[in-house]
Image (cartoon, helix red, strand yellow):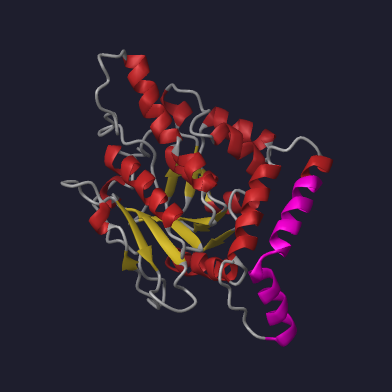
Amino acid sequence: MGPPFTTPGLIGPAQPSTTGRGASGAWQASAMSDDTATAGSETVVRLERVAETGPDSGIRILTLDRPDRLNAMNPALIDQLHERIDELRADDHARVVVLTGAGRGFCSGLDLQDASPTGLSGNGGRGRMQRGMDVQQRIAGLVPALRSLRIPVIAAVNGAAAGGGLALALASDVRVAAASAKFNVAFVRIGLSGCDIGVSWLLPRWIGASRAFELMLTGRMVFAEEAERIGLVSRVVPDDELLDAALETARQVCANSPTGVWMTKEVMWAQLEVGSLNAGIDLENRTQILTSYTEDMHEAVGAFLERRPPEFRNR
């Protein structure tokens, strides 16, 4: 589950959210999810459109919004993040989502000051272990939920991504980091196993087993420069350019067909579990034939030959 990031002096007063604008303030996201929060609860996870119409209309921004706690995971945040992911899954017009944190941090792990069980009722007097497993599975379920989305998830990591926050970044398809970004496997620092919320499966695949062992056994901090060097993130940009950089990648994704992007994400994740080169090639072969029968594939070829932008219909 992972503790909040508790280096002395790091958790401070709430900072104004920078989500909703890049360095140039060139776009203003429109809220999609404020009315869908559980009745009587504060909205702590926001889902927004970058634009109502035009080429950016398929881009979504998913913001963890507890800046006074560096967006640490509490019951409301966990539940609302599940809800927002479900909304994305049902959104036929969404093409890509940028996941980020409001204020100075991405996500600092589990909020130990507000970590009561979430989404549970009628436990029938079950024991501490059984109730704890329900909570554990609820939090860990965020990782396969992100992976199972048909659209790519771009993590725009600002500040601390610790514990569960690291897991969310690893579960994303692309990671872009601000210069202030820092990552660590926080679980092992509070007497738990470092293996939690999918981190022990994902981290070795992104940076190699040798480096992953060292980071998971020590729990030491990895700052942005090292994260880029070891392949944990794709690129590092100045803090005030983070969302613009993530949106640049999102626009590049949107230039490709919805089905082509979906199948690419699907096959890339599947290849992490496939048992042999031949099995991987067989999967690719079938996927290429499937996508060749889509209308969008023919539109992409026609647009290329005619030197014009394609107009995809997701058919």
Return the residue nearer the eye: 81 or 169. Answer: 81
Q: Is residue 202 above or below residue 16?
A: above
The structure residue drawn at horizontal position 57% and vertical position 35%, both measured from the top left corner, is 215
The answer to whether residue 167 of the structure is visible from this angle is no
Image location of residue 238, percent across then percent down: 48, 65
- Tally the marks: 0
Examine the image and state in which quarter residue 305 appears: bottom right
Horizontal arrangement in the rendering, residue 261 relative to residue 149 (left or right):
right
Horizontal arrangement in the rendering, residue 119 relative to residue 136 (left or right):
left
User: Does the magenta segment cover residue 282?
Assistant: yes
The structure residue drawn at horizontal position 36% and vertical position 17%, both measured from the top left corner, is 130
Examine the image and state in which quarter residue 139 appears: top left
Which stretch did the figure color magenta? 281-307
- Judged from this view, the residue extending furthest toward the right is 278
The answer to whether residue 53 of the structure is visible from this angle is yes
Quadrant location of the N terminus in the rendered image: top left
Secondary structure character of the magenta stretch overall: helix
The structure residue drawn at horizontal position 18% and vertical position 47%, both measured from the top left corner, is 39
User: Does the magenta segment cover residue 251?
Assistant: no
The structure residue drawn at horizontal position 35% and vertical position 69%, both measured from the top left corner, is 29
Quadrant location of the C terminus in the rendered image: bottom right
Return the residue nearer the eye: 197 or 240. Answer: 197
Return the residue nearer the eye: 220 or 147. Answer: 147
Q: Is residue 181 above or below residue 201?
A: below
Q: Is residue 78 above or below residue 244?
A: above
Q: Is residue 72 above or below residue 239?
A: above
Image location of residue 226, percent across then percent down: 59, 49
Image location of residue 274, percent across then percent down: 73, 38
Horizontal arrangement in the rendering, residue 151 relative to residue 32 (left or right):
right
Image location of residue 248, percent across then percent down: 54, 70
